Amino acid sequence: MLLGTRAACLRAAIVVIAFGIATIQGVAAPKFSAWSEPVHLGPLVNSDANEQGPAISRNGLSLFFGSARPDSIGNFDIWVSQRGCVGDPWGPPINVVGLNSTSLDTLPSLSPDGHWMFFTSSRPGGSGDADLWAAYRADRHNDFGWETPINLGSDVNSALFDAAPELTRKRGKVGPLLYFARGPNNNALDIYVSELGADGTFGAPTPVAELNSTFSDARVSVRRDGLEIFFYSNRPGLGLNDLWMSMRGKVTDPWLPSVNVGGPVNTPFNEVHPELSRDGRTLYFVSGRPRPGSVTPPGNTDLWVTTRTELDGDDEPRGCEDEEEEEEG
């Protein structure tokens, strides 16, 4: 009887979630289909350790992520897996030595123009627990050409746990925005935002009230047009942590009430660290669900991917051509 009651509650929750997403998608174009059944990135990319924080390059050919695999330099390192063409299988991950230290280094995120990597590190030289750091590369196609990482400074970082940075591009009069998570620890976070000024400095961070809850909310990924945002939260949902989303009509509007992404993306297990591709059709994320062919969870988190189609636009599959070459601020 208890299982039957729980199943009924779960079905009711999915109906509410589906209605919420349908309602919120009416706000802004483009419109997309539902997310597909997630696909595990496989044993070549995933390891027996925890994987987290995927970051996909502009051209979709490089996937950066944090991993605690045994051959890391620190307790978490940033790694990259590459492929020759969108649709090809991912190659074996390589340690991005220039970004890593003997401390925690994880949750990478690429700037819109591909020249900067923002990430989380607990290395010496910061303001507190974990801080936001950034590294520059002159050639955005060189995944190993990073200059020495720099701390974003006390104007952004605090004595608390600062993590999971995401820089959005400039849109009209709204400058590039740096979203990140802050809290006393990794399980009690709020989403903050800081605007990058014309002088190259970040303004004082402020909490994004409409996205935060009394629970932990973190690690955003913003669609290229700035009108859709994904994040994860342990607020009541389908599992331990779920992926949530919100939309808005224009970039100067506040975000609408958040909606659970729902199944099949979310499960009763942990779903965290969403990363949306540049075209908005592919969502990488981290999950503790059972691996393919298994009925038990692996005891750690793996990288997964789900896709959707654009209903009102050109949704032709991409070939092996290079990315668009325009620079984005």
Image (cartoon, helix red, strand yellow):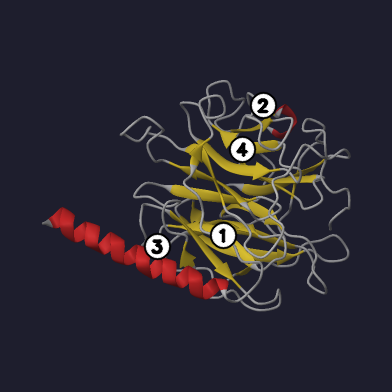
Distance between the alpha carbons at the discs numbered 2 and 1: 27 Å
Judged by depth in the image, the label closer to the viewer, 1 or 4, is 1
Judged by depth in the image, the label closer to the viewer, 1 or 3, is 1
Instruction: Please rate how many residues cluster around mark 1, counting C-alpha atoms within 10 Å: few if below 14, some from 14 to 19, many from 20.
Output: many
Q: Is residue 98 left or right of residue 280?
A: right
Q: Earlier in the sequence, mark 1 or mark 4?
A: 4
Judged by depth in the image, the label closer to the viewer, 2 or 1, is 1
Q: Is residue 4 left or right of residue 28?
A: left
Residue at 63%, 26% (x, y): give it.
Answer: 93
Front in this rendered view, residue 93 or 155:
93
Q: Which residue is mark 2?
A: 95
SS type, badge 1: strand
Residues at marks 1 and 3 touching, judged by CB atoms closer than 8 Å? no
Residues at marks 4 and 2 touching, judged by CB atoms closer than 8 Å? no
Q: Amino acid at mark 1?
A: Phe
Screen quadrant of the N terminus = bottom left
Residue at 23%, 57% (x, y): give it.
Answer: 7
Q: Which mark is residue 230?
A: 1
Distance between the alpha carbons at the discs numbered 1 and 3: 14 Å
Q: Earlier in the sequence, mark 4 or mark 2?
A: 4
Residue at 68%, 43% (x, y): give it.
Answer: 56
Front in this rendered view, residue 312 or 139:
312
Q: Which residue is mark 3?
A: 235
Residues at marks 1 and 4 touching, judged by CB atoms closer than 8 Å? no
Residue 281 is situated, as x and y percent measured from the top left of the image, at 63, 53
Q: Amino acid at mark 4?
A: Phe
Q: Quadrant of residue 237?
A: bottom left
